Amino acid sequence: MEKEKIVSVGGQAVIEGVMMKSPEGIATAVRRKDGQIVYRKKTISKSNAKLMKIPFIRGVVILLESLFVGTGELTFAANQAGEEEEELTKPQLILTLAVSLLFGMGLFIILPSIIGGVVFRNSTALSSVLEGLLRVIIFLSYIYLISRNKEIKRVFQYHGAEHKSIYVFENKEELEFENAKKYTTLHPRCGTSFLFIVMMVSILIYSTLDVIIPKPDTHLMRILLKVGIRFGFMPIVAGLSYEIQKYSSRHMDNPLVSLLALPGLKLQNITTQEPDESQLEVGMTALRASLNMEVNAINIEEEQK
């Protein structure tokens, strides 16, 4: 008997809207200030199809693609919602993505490493423990602080709408926003859960490397080595984290897997909020458009003709 192919959809919240990605394409739906829903659809490039089949490598590829596409859809949404005048060009997108990646790695990876190395110069174990604690504290503090922003709260509501819409698809129900109301805003394949897994995996891998790799004689060189290791092994951390999340999301019926996934799900109580009906409608519009289904919204490409 032929094994049924698992078709998955994913997405992200944007300003006043939702982006959805399915095997059929990528669609972003946004509610304008006048109440109208507009959307645009993009086909998915097949250039990385072979890499997507290689475990660990595919995680890095998917992460970079998601960041690039997500940044572009964020600017589109901001433009349609009236927050920005123009969309970013491709060079501007690349620069924005590069700066964002460097900022994220600097804040969550490099800064804790440097502080840990400076405070505990002569103890690898204590330095690693402090680094891990700081990484988690900075991560949780960052999420909490941005959640206090009024505009970010609306993005988090659309994040909840994204998850609820995906649950309707996964449970093979009719893709109408009314069917999404009953579902939770928490989802095991969420980016919040992925970031938490990255935090935990990075602590484990970097602590192990700190123990087994010989230390230079000078303190400055030891700090530089730690920073170099963090940068160099980040793709491995990302690839392994992706495989862990991919496996766990398909085995949530396993009590142990469910328990290990619980912290990431709990964090989503901050990064997702209960959406209203109008936000659910936007989420479902994006999902239907990504699947090449009929939608009651304005196609931005047709509007601009």
Image (cartoon, rainbow, N blue to C red):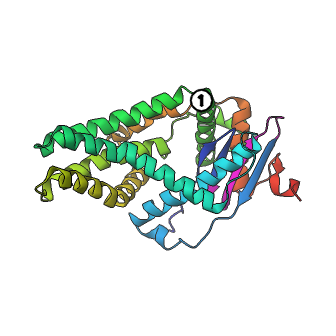
- Left-right relation of 3 to 208: right
Q: Quadrant of residue 177?
A: top right
Is 24 inside the magenta-drawn segment? yes
- Left-right relation of 82 to 239: right
Q: Residue at x 14, y 46 (%)?
A: 124
Q: In the rendered view, would you say 236 is above or below 281?
A: below
- Left-right relation of 109 to 273: left
Q: Label 1 sits on what residue type?
A: Lys
- Where's the C terminus, which quadrant? bottom right
Q: Residue at x 63, y 47 (%)?
A: 169
- Furthest-right residue in this view: 305
Q: Residue at x 42, y 45 (%)?
A: 195
Which span of residues is magenta-colored?
21-36
Where does label 1 land, which residue? Answer: 153
Q: In the rendered view, would you say 37 is above or below 230?
A: above
Q: In the rendered view, would you say 198 is above or below 305?
A: above
| Residue 270 visible in the displayed image | yes
| Residue 23 visible in the displayed image | no
From the top left corner, tell me how far across and down residue 97 is, in percent. 53, 54
Q: Quadrant of residue 33?
A: top right
Q: How many C-alpha atoms fall within 10 Å of the one at disc 1: few (<14), some, or many (≥20)?
A: some
From the top left corner, tell me how far across and down residue 71 is, in percent. 60, 52
Is 263 inside the magenta-drawn segment? no
From the top left corner, tell me how far across and down residue 15 is, in percent. 66, 40
Work out whether residue 66 or residue 296 is closer to the camera in this orientation and state it. Answer: 66
Q: In the rendered view, would you say 146 is above or below 293?
A: above
Q: Residue at x 32, y 39 (%)?
A: 135
